[in-house]
Amino acid sequence: MRLASLNDGTKDGRLIVVAPHGDHYALAPVATLQAALEDWTTWAPRLAAINSFALPLDVGDLLAPLPRSWQWLDGSVYPSHGALMDKALNITPFKPDWPPMYQGVSDTFHAPNADVPMADVALGIDFEGEFGIITDAVPMGTSAADAHQYIRLIVQINDWSLRKLAGPEMRSGFGWIQAKPPCGMAPFAITPDELGDLWADGRPALHLHVDLNGAPFGRAYGEPMAYGFHELVAHAARTRNLVAGTVIGSGTVSNENYREVGSSCIAERRGIEIVDHGEPSTEFMSYGDTVRMEARRPDGSAPFGVLQQKVVKP
Amino acid sequence: MRLASLNDGTKDGRLIVVAPHGDHYALAPVATLQAALEDWTTWAPRLAAINSFALPLDVGDLLAPLPRSWQWLDGSVYPSHGALMDKALNITPFKPDWPPMYQGVSDTFHAPNADVPMADVALGIDFEGEFGIITDAVPMGTSAADAHQYIRLIVQINDWSLRKLAGPEMRSGFGWIQAKPPCGMAPFAITPDELGDLWADGRPALHLHVDLNGAPFGRAYGEPMAYGFHELVAHAARTRNLVAGTVIGSGTVSNENYREVGSSCIAERRGIEIVDHGEPSTEFMSYGDTVRMEARRPDGSAPFGVLQQKVVKP
C-alpha cells in the first residue's frame, strides 16, 4: 500500500491511496495520514481494500505524506557516515554503544517537489539522503523485538543540514537547532509489505540514487545499518511513550565502499576529499541548486517516488 | 489574561479563560489554545473581553495549558546552572557564545497535577524548574528586537530529566533523547501584561518556589537570564520558521547566590555538594516522591498556579 497527501490547502493535507502503477489515486476514507495512524487497526484494512483508482495523480499536487509530525527523531546508524563526518566537521565525538539520535523540527516536512528556503548560502547548505519509518503509538519500554510490530510505514527523507553550524552546535552537547532546518519527504509512504524480502531485520535493501544538479552523486545501499529500525524505535521509547505518527530516521545512507557507490550528502564527500587530499574541494549547495533522491528496488522501480528539491532564498 | 485547558477527553483539551482570582472560569469562544494561537489577532481580543466567570474551577480537571505542541525548544541561560551541571555530570563542554538550546519531546506536556511515570529509579530522576514562553508564528530570520512581539504567553515548566543518561548523551553531541522524557506545565498560561513591570527585557522577575516532598528546595529568582526570551526566539528562528504554539524554555532557574536561594533541580544541589565536599549526598527522586513548583510575585501571588507532580512506576 502506498499512501500520499494531497495539497488541499490544509496543514495536514488530504490522504490518498496511490495505485500500484503510481499514476492514479483514490481518496482515502479517512481525511489525514495522522488520523489513520491514530486508529490504524480500523483504517489499514479499509485503505488496503481500495482497488479502484480513478483520479489521475500529479506529484506536483502532493505535500509530504506526513506534512507535519508530533515527533521527528533521527538516528545516525551507517558507520561509514559517522567516520567521514568526524573528518568533515573536525570533531572527535564520544562514540556511544547505542544508536546516536537527535530530535529535530517536526512541524514541517517539505513537499517532495518543494523549493526549500535556506537562510544563507554561507552556512554550508547540504542534503542528507535517508530512510525513515513512521510508527504507531509505542509504549515506553518496548523491546527491539517487539518494536517491529509498531512500524507502520516506511518513507524516504532528505534531512537538510547547515554544516558550518553543525560542528559548533555538536560540541555544545545540546544537539542541533540552527544546523537542522525542516526535512523533505518523498511522495509516497509505503507499508513494509510493499518491499517484500527487501525489508528484513528492520532494514531496507534498496539503493538510494542521489543526483546533484543532474549529475550522479551517490548510489549507496540501505541495508548495512548498524542498528535496524526496530532497534531505533526501542531506543527512542526507552524512557518515553511514542505517539502515533512519530517519524524515525536512519541518518545518511552510507557504505564502506564509498569510493564506488558515492555519498548521500556533500559533507561526506568532503570528508573523503580530506582523507585523500588533506582538504575538501566539493562546494556546498547554492541558491538554485537541485538535489534529486530516489530509492530503487533491484528492478529499478522506486517505491517512494522521487524527492526533488531546489534551494532558494527565503 | 490567564488561559488553561480543561480535560474533556481530547488530546488538546478545551480552552478556558480563568478569572483573576483563579477559582472560576469561562469557556473560551475557540476550542483549543493551539487554535487560538494560530489566529491570535482574532481571538486574543475576544478572550480578553470575557469578564463573566460562572463556572467553578477544579485544578484537578486541567491538562497542561498547551497539552502538546509542534515544537519544544529548551534553552539553558542561567549561567550558574551551567557551571554546576558541569560539576554534577562530570563534563567539560564547549561553551558557546550563543544560548545553548536543545529540541525536546513536545507531543506531551503533563498536566499540572499528573502522576508522572518514569522508566527506572536507577536513572537519576530529577526535576528542572523553568519558565517558558509560547510564540505565535515567527518568520525565519527574525531579530531579537522584533521577536518580543511574537511572545504570546508565558508558562511555568518542569523539565523532567534522567541524569544518569544525560552525561553520556551529551558527550555524543546529539543532545538528549532518553535523558529527557516529557515535561510538566503549571495550570495557567498568562499573557505578558499579567506580569506588568515584572516582565522586562524578556525576563520574568518572579521567584520560583520549589519544594521536594514538602520541604523547601529552591527559591531562585527568574530575572538573571544571560539571554532574554526574545533572544531565545531569535536564536531558534535563525534558520527555520517557528509555527504558532512553539514553546521555548529558559532552562533551570538558577542564581549565583545558590547557597542562599537553593536550587531548582537536584543535580545542581549535587553539584554544590561536589564543590563543597567532593561528592554528592542528595539522592535523586524515587517512586512516590513529589515536587511542587510555584512562581511568585513579590506580593506572594502565583500567576501560573501550582505545578505539583508525583513520580510513579509506569
Image (tube, coloured by chain):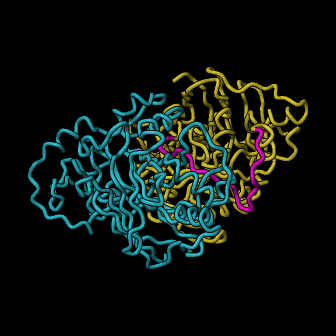
Chain colours: A cyan, B yellow
Q: Position of residue B132 (x, y in %)?
A: 63, 50
Q: Is residue A136 visible?
A: yes
Q: Is residue B128 left or right of residue A22?
A: right
Residue at left offset 22%, top offset 36%: A42
Residue A17 placement (x, y as % from top left): 19, 52
Q: Residue furthest right?
A: B276
Q: What range of the chain is rendered magenta?
A: B90-108
Percent position of residue A163, x then y: 58, 64
Q: Is residue B140 above or below residue B159?
A: below
Q: Nearer the viewer, residue A253 or B216?
A: A253
Please determine whether, in this image, residue B31 is positioned above or below residue B291: below
- A250 part of magenta stretch: no
Residue closest to the eye, A21 or B42: A21
Between A237 and B55, the residue placed more toward the observer is: A237
* Residue B274 left/right relative to B197: right
Magenta stretch containing residue B93, yes or no? yes
- Taking depth in this image into account, of B107 and B114 the one nearest to the observer is B107
Which residue is drawn at the image coordinates 29% and 38% (left, top)?
Answer: A39
Relative horizontal placement of residue A302, taking residue B111 as reference (left or right): left
Residue B274 spot, x, y in % from top left:
85, 33
Instruction: Tell me, yes or no, if residue B43 can be seen here.
Output: no
State the residue at coordinates (73%, 55%): B198
